[in-house]
Image (cartoon, rainbow, N blue to C red):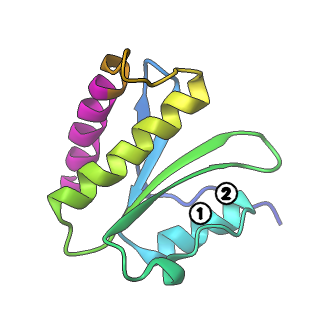
Amino acid sequence: MKLRFPKGVKNFEVPIYDQRVYVTTKQSEVDAIDRYMHCGNIEWHLRRHSAGYCVHEVQEQTGIPLFLVVLRRPIKPHAIVHECGHLALMIAERVGIKVSYDDQEPFCYLLDWLFAKVTAELKR
């Protein structure tokens, strides 16, 4: 049986880096994505005390990367920006951008952009 990526999961493209980000607040979507990815690392129940978390995995069969932001309700603004910080660092590493004190702008612009996009997806 071939698994398909779960329909209806909020997502957006990061066009400048050609990466796709998925955003959810639902355990059922986390579980479905984990089954699709065959990674077994997206463990909602182990992170039950956190306001959110961010995951970067690569789908076993296709090599397609997955960036997933999981936020728990009630969603807090500090949790969004915190997870977007992780997300920005993960994307930067994936595409080969070195983030350093001397060259902070790519990270800061990406963080700003991601925060706006994740916030918009959550309102959709």
Q: Quadrant of residue 79?
A: bottom left
Residue 59 in the image, given as x and y percentages of width and height: 72, 49
Residue 77 numbered tag? none
Q: Work out whether residue 30 or residue 56 is closer to the camera in this orientation and state it.
A: 56
User: Helix, strand, or loop for circle 1?
Assistant: helix
* Dot in front, 2 or 1: 1
Three-letter amino acid code at the position of disc 2:
Arg
Q: How would you classify the magenta stretch by its main secondary structure?
A: helix
Relative to residue 67, is residue 36 depicted above or below? below
Relative to 19, 113 lies left or right: left
Q: Residues within 10 Å of mark 1 (few under 14, many from 20)?
A: many
Q: Quadrant of the N terminus?
A: bottom right
Distance (Cα) linking label 2 and label 1: 9 Å
Left of 90 or right of it: where is 1? right
* Magenta span contains residue 15: no
Residue extent of the magenta highlight: 108-124
Residue at screen point 19% across, 75% down: 74
97 or 116: nearer the viewer:
97
Query: What element does badge 2 sit on?
Result: loop
Q: Position of residue 109 (x, y in %)?
A: 28, 23
Sequence order check, earlier mark of 2 and 1: 2
Magenta stretch contains residue 109: yes
Image x and y of residue 62, in percent: 78, 41
Which disc, if any, is residue 33?
1
Q: Residue at x 42, y 82 (%)?
A: 48
Which residue is disc 2 drawn over? 4
